[in-house]
Image (tube, rainbow, N blue to C red):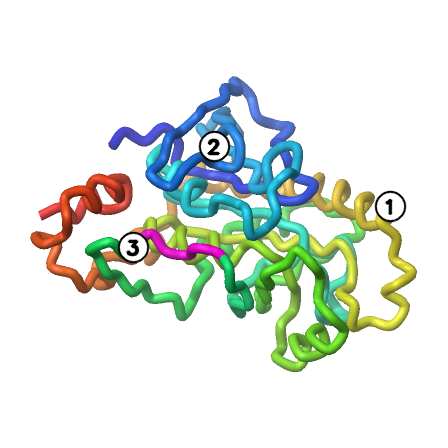
Amino acid sequence: MTAIATIGILGGSGLYKMEALTEVEELQVDTPFGKTSDALILGKLAGMKVVFLARHGRSHHLLPAEVPYRANIYALKSLGVKYILSASAVGSLQEEARPLDIVIPDQFIDRTKNRPSTFFGEGIVAHIGFADPICQVLAAELAQAAATIDLGEAKVHQGGTYLCMEGPAFSTKSESHLYRSWGAKVIGMTNLTEAKLAREAEIAYATLALVTDYDCWREGHESVTVEMVIENLHRNAANAQKIILATVERLANNSPVSAAHEALKTAILTDLGKVPAATFQRLEAILAKYRP
């Protein structure tokens, strides 16, 4: 497989394109898991080839549970992506994570229920290690890049738990207080599924969780308006683009080794000689280096 780009960028609510991309072209990538959320945008950022994909589509037409996560991650893998920089809007579950702040999570709690979250099955079984679901090396690159940038009033929080809920409805107050009692820092609807699939695809994954508002646990939350949230989305997206650009610049000078890049080495339980040919073909981009 010839790598077209080693860095993939997944944009969430409010981040539908990367303004700094040059030499842009759209790619349609066929996958065994259907169509991607939108066209993949290939271009150059800091002199490096990168691929950008709007998670919900550029017109934001996909619910969190409708996002074709397997197609998205598989398409990035098939293009040679080794690092995924994700950005997504979240609500805050803790007072210190204020609207406009940015959290770089290191853990997840999974509260999803209606979405495929593995490439495996149909004749092959693999159990990836997921104790540390975020690539700590890549998360450190994001944090170090953010420290070099003027982000205005936004504060960057390194570490914290992202609770991934099913959606599309937001939490009840009882749920929000429960999640706070579990120690979760932010709440969103997408990143956990991506992180699982990226690990199976042996891609390093880290995310910028962009706080738009406090979740409903906080008194006075009802006074937050849609206009305010949308304004925060735009301001968050601007800061996210700055951090992603600075991170790509860092990766251009150093391609860090991640444990994620060997995630399947000890994860596959099935005798590969007995995996159905059709299954091997379906997962070619992921299993090519393990073919017996």
Q: Reply above or below: 223 against 87.
A: below
Secondary structure of the residue carrying tag 2 is strand
Spot occupied by residue 276 in the image (x, y as percentages of width and height): 14, 48
Spot occupied by residue 35 in the image (x, y as percentages of width and height): 44, 34
Residue 51: mark in rendering: 2
**Alpha carbon of mark 3 to alpha carbon of mark 1: how far?**
42 Å
Q: Disc 3 marks which residue?
A: 120
Q: Residue at x 36, y 35 (%)?
A: 31
How dense is the environment of label 2, judged by Cα within 10 Å: few (below 14), some, or many (20 and up)?
Answer: many
Q: Residue at x 44, y 36 (%)?
A: 252
Q: Reply above or below: 11 against 265.
A: above
Residue 71: mark in rendering: none
State the residue lying farthest toward the bottom: 181
Mark 1 or mark 2, which has the lower sequence index?
2
Image marks 2 and 3: residues in contact by CB distance under 8 Å: no
Task: Please report the bounds of the magenta region as a residue range.
Answer: 115-120
How dense is the environment of label 1, judged by Cα within 10 Å: few (below 14), some, or many (20 and up)?
Answer: few
Mark 3 or mark 1, which has the lower sequence index?
3
In this picture, residue 204 sits left or right of residue 101: left
Front label number (3 vs 1): 3
Q: Quadrant of residue 262?
A: bottom left
**Alpha carbon of mark 2 to alpha carbon of mark 3: how far?**
25 Å
Spot occupied by residue 22 in the image (x, y as percentages of width and height): 55, 21
Q: Residue at x 50, y 59 (%)?
A: 114
Front label number (2 vs 3): 3
